[in-house]
Image (cartoon, rainbow, N blue to C red):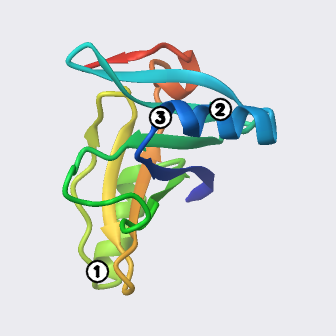
Amino acid sequence: MIRQTVHLCVRSHDLKKSEEFYSRAFGLSIAFEIFRGGKRSGFYLDCGNNTFLEIFEVTEPSVPSGKLSTMAHIALECDDIHAVCEKIKLAGYGVSEPCLGCDHTFQAWVTDPAGLQIELQQYTSESNQITRKNIMI
């Protein structure tokens, strides 16, 4: 069922400062980057064993730095995303239908009782988490 935590997503008001911090403080390197409309909008930092720290730029200008929760979601790798989603439904909880994301990874979403979003993922041979290719949206 669930294999491992695959990434934590952190929101950033300054991608360059975030990259410098995680690189200098922890020695993490970029596995791949995400570009939206030709502009860098985020990146994955390699934490080993196909686990990542995902950094996304905050795009809501009305939210001042420090006033937005930096934790966006947690992602869990599944060996069979359809079976996991069915189990969640049978337990009485809502879950989105699995779909292929722009990172070539199957994903579905569920929200915990406290409101934390949980992304379920099942990698494919083309998943950017495996290939380390940049994502161009």
Q: Residues within 10 Å of mark 1 (few under 14, many from 20)?
A: some
What's the mark number on residue 15? 3
Q: Residues within 10 Å of mark 2 (few under 14, many from 20)?
A: some
Residue type for callout 2 = Glu
Residue sitting at x 29%, y 34%: 101
Q: Residues under labels 2 and 3: Cα distance? A: 9 Å
Q: If the image is split into quadrants, where does the C terminus sit?
A: top left
* N-terminal label among 1 and 3: 3
Residue sitting at x 29%, y 28%: 102
Foreground mark, 1 or 3, reads 3
Residue type for callout 3 = Leu
> Is 104 in front, or is 2?
104
Is 31 left, or right, of 128 in this rendering? right
Q: If the image is split into quadrants, where does the N terminus sit?
A: bottom right
The picture places residue 88, in percent across and down from the top left corner, at 36, 73
Task: Choose top left, top right, bottom left or bottom right for residue 90.
Answer: bottom left
* N-terminal label among 1 and 2: 2
- Identify residue for label 1: 93
Helix, strand or loop for disc 2: helix
